[in-house]
């Protein structure tokens, strides 16, 4: 029966990796408080250590990705601010352009355009939520791998944001030196906000992918049906 269980991207990112983050967080807090000794972790079976190491490497990469992504967007803003002492129209215009990359307004406009285009394609077949209709169609007839990847990362970073907030609150009570707890809480809270922002980015990636695949695939399917 176990061999029939299929683990999808959503299950892996939203459940397995999110659960691993919680376990690593608890172990870290226990090590810091002296509840668990490091020597006990070293005595774990090699197979479990190998699995945990692989999960740890994957999690570190996933946790660094939003930081490097926001870094790529923040640097042009900082460079614009440092360009000159005079705040002329060109500098302000460039600053506004760079800042717009961090906002969702352009994304939402594109999603609305695709939503309207999808509704035109659906016409009389539309029932209920247009996004849900398009997603179900892509799952059944299209290539769902692309949007499922974005959906899985959306779920992971949303969970990671919540876990970060819980960890930030925990730091205020677990550390004996209050300033260490406050500094750790602020740093983790910042990461939590960053992960929440990244989850919204992947949600919009997913929405665009669903509508694009539906619009293209539905038109092709309709054209083939009319020719038969």
Image: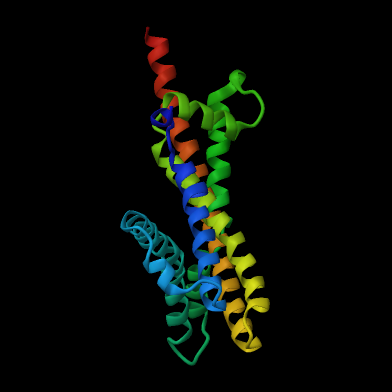
Q: Which of 112 and 130 is in front in this view?
A: 130
The image quadrant of residue 69 is bottom left
In the rendered image, which quarter contains the N terminus? Answer: top left
Is residue 73 left or right of 197 when viewed as pictured?
left
In the rendered image, which quarter contains the C terminus? Answer: top left
Q: Where is residue 158 in the image (x, y as percent from the top left)?
A: 57, 55
The image quadrant of residue 61 is bottom left
Q: How many labels does the image show?
A: 0
Instruction: Kindly identify the residue that appears in the image at 64 percent across and 23 percent down.
Output: 127
Image color mode: rainbow
The image quadrant of residue 50 is bottom left
Instruction: Kindly identify the residue that appears in the image at 37 percent across and 65 percent down.
Output: 43
Q: Nearer the viewer, residue 174 or 12?
A: 174
Is residue 221 left or right of 134 when viewed as pictured?
left
Depicted 109 relative to depicted 140: above or below? below
Residue lying farthest to the top in this orientation: 228
Residue 182 visible in rendering:
yes
Q: Nearer the viewer, residue 77 or 165?
A: 165
Q: Position of residue 25 (x, y in %)?
A: 53, 66
Q: Where is residue 200 in the image (x, y as percent from the top left)?
A: 56, 55
Q: Position of residue 198 (x, y in %)?
A: 52, 59
Depicted 38 relative to depicted 114: above or below? below
Residue lying farthest to the bottom in this orientation: 85
Instruction: Kindly identify the residue that appears in the image at 62 percent across and 76 percent down.
Output: 171
Depicted 80 relative to depicted 122: above or below? below
Residue 205 visible in rendering:
no
């Amino acid at each position: 029966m176990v061999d029939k269980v299929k683990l999808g991207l959503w299950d892996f990112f939203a459940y397995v990796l999110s659960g691993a983050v919680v376990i690593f967080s608890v172990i870290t807090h226990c090590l810091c408080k002296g509840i668990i000794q490091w020597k006990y972790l070293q005595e774990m079976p090699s197979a479990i250590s190998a699995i945990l190491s692989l999960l740890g490497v994957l999690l570190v990469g996933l946790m660094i990705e939003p930081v490097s992504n926001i870094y790529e967007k923040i640097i042009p803003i900082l460079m614009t601010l440092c360009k000159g002492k005079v705040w002329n129209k060109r500098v302000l215009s460039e600053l506004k352009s760079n800042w717009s990359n961090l906002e969702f307004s352009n994304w939402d406009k594109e999603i609305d355009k695709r939503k309207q285009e999808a509704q035109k394609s659906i016409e009389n077949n539309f029932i209920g939520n247009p996004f849900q209709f398009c997603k179900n169609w892509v799952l059944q007839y299209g290539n769902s791998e692309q949007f499922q990847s974005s959906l899985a990362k959306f779920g992971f970073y949303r969970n990671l944001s919540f876990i970060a907030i819980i960890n930030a609150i925990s730091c205020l009570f677990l550390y004996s030196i209050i300033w260490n707890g406050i500094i750790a809480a602020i740093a983790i809270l910042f990461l939590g906000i960053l992960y929440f922002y990244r989850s919204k980015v992947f949600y919009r990636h997913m929405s665009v992918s669903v509508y694009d695949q539906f619009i293209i695939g539905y038109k092709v399917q309709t054209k083939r049906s009319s020719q038969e």
